[in-house]
Amino acid sequence: MSVGTDGPLGDEVRESGQDAAPPQQSLGTAAARNLATTTKSAPQMQEITSRWLLRMLPWVQVQGGTYRLNRRLSYAVGDGRVTFVQTGSQVEVIPGELGELPPLRGYDDEAVLRELAQRCRQVRFAPGDVLAAKGEATDRVFLLAHGRVEQIGTGPYGDEAVLGVLADGSYFGERSLVDGDAVWEFTVRADTACIALELTRQDVLTLADRAESLSGHLRSVVSVPHQRTNKYGEAAIDLSAGHVGEAVVPHTFVDYEAAPREYELSVAQTVLKVHSRVADLYNQPMNQTEQQLRLTVEALRERQEDELVNNKDFGLLANCDYGQRLQPHDGVPGPDDMDELLSRRRGSRLFLAHPRAIAAFGRECSRRGVYPDTVDIGGSRIPSWRGVPIFPCNKIPISKARTTSIICMRTGEDDQGVIGLHQAGIPDEIEPSLSVRFMGIDEQALISYLVTAYYSAAVLVPDALGVLENVEVSRWH
């Protein structure tokens, strides 16, 4: 029985014939690729950044792995920052952190400090509330756990002027603990909602009546003779100028710190393993071991820059003097804040900021109708402020509250600035202070290489480094 093409079945056959793929007439690309040499890229890595800090920091050769920073003797100890513990809505000061207050600096009786911490009372302030009024008696110290306050004074023409801004970890009124006649030299007003702890002079004196160690310490603070210093807190050098006749020329000498700080080179290491079969058979057209080492070194340098910014021992953010830490007047980084940061030091060479902080600064400049210039650095156009380049650095952290920091620094030994520390010339070195050592081949035919980088950083004098803290990066006008 024959089957015709008429009817529904014939229509399906004709339709299927129209949609059928034509027969293959030449070799397909997928098969041909098996015999062809493709054009390949070197292995790529998203973690690689511009690493401007490593490129712009002057590196000083350190023999013996340690750099000793000698400074002129200083009597003035930098203001500390108080740390708190938060449990729900309750905030408590860590007892040992009370030693950051100048009247309690050097006092180490843990039991007494713990009781002082328990006597601190938590208070809250709304924006605009006055915490202290100029001229009134100071009878308590405030420990600012969260928020921002302004120090208000009188301008040269009798108008109100903002003398400074304090934020998390700051304190004020500490003189009241040792001076019953102290008065507020400025008005303190909350700029945002604030949480603070207050410790009254009466609480301290009551406890001192029972704790002889505390009363003795407070007496020693009051009785310490005043040391003559310059405006930087360094021991004064007696000089005579403008005299006539046979005036007696003063005698003097320059004293040094008895226990200068020493910076030991930090280390970052990893062991790279490459199978011998890969190294033997798959080295064309690119050397597998060389590419593996290249990417490992890139990751090591990224970690090095992160450590130079964030390490608690020698990192820039942790080693900035508290007197060089500023707060933005309006939260967002503006031209006024950048000018204030520049004014704190001579010869500033560079800013360092997270890309989002640079964008926030650009938005604020645009809002004000200000357009920063750019400068040419090695063929790259870098945004600048007052001629000082603003380099991007994604290693500067952004907090959960979407705030970050902007770093400004002077660099170089000759300018008493910030320097990088390394030791060039180490064995098996492939880059300054970075070595790759062959460690052998194990029973699994794995070739091992020890990759090591040595580095650190030092701030030669406190005003070489400044930080604009708590910069908001997510506010849009």
Image (cartoon, rainbow, N blue to C red):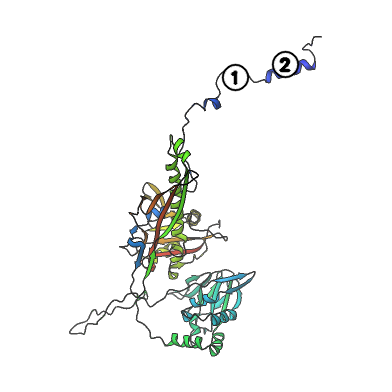
Q: Tell me the residue that label 1 is attached to.
A: 24
**In the rendered image, the vertical position of residue 243 relative to residue 427, given as above or below:** below
Question: In this orientation, does residue 129 appear?
Answer: no
Residue drawn at (37%, 60%) of the image:
421
Among the two numbered marks 1 and 2 on one chain, the one whose residue lies closer to the N terminus:
2
Crowd class of label 2 (few under 14; some 14 to 19; many from 20; radius 10 Å): few
Question: In this orientation, does residue 85 appear?
Answer: yes
Tell us which disc is closer to us: 1 or 2: 1
Kindly identify which numbered label has been placed on residue 306.
none
Which of the two residues, 137 or 100, is positioned nearer the viewer here? 100
Q: Amino acid at mark 2?
A: Arg
Q: Residue 54 location in percent, x, y?
A: 40, 54
Q: Amino acid at mark 1?
A: Gln
Residue drawn at (40%, 77%) of the image:
76
Q: Residue 359 location in percent, x, y?
A: 49, 53
Which of the two residues, 187 or 345, is positioned nearer the viewer here? 345
Secondary element at tag 2: helix
**In the rendered image, the vertical position of residue 339 relative to residue 124, given as above or below:** above
Query: Image quadrant of residue 315?
Result: bottom left
| Placement of the N terminus among the 4 image quadrants | top right
Q: Tell me the residue that label 2 is attached to.
A: 14
Which residue appears farthest toward the left when viewing the image? 245
Which of the two residues, 63 or 42, is positioned nearer the viewer here? 63
Which of the two residues, 35 or 102, is positioned nearer the viewer here? 35
Residue 163 placement, left or right of 225: right
| Placement of the C terminus among the 4 image quadrants | bottom right
Q: Residue 321 location in percent, x, y?
A: 43, 69
**In the rendered image, the vertical position of residue 334 relative to residue 76, given as above or below:** above
Crowd class of label 1 (few under 14; some 14 to 19; many from 20; radius 10 Å): few
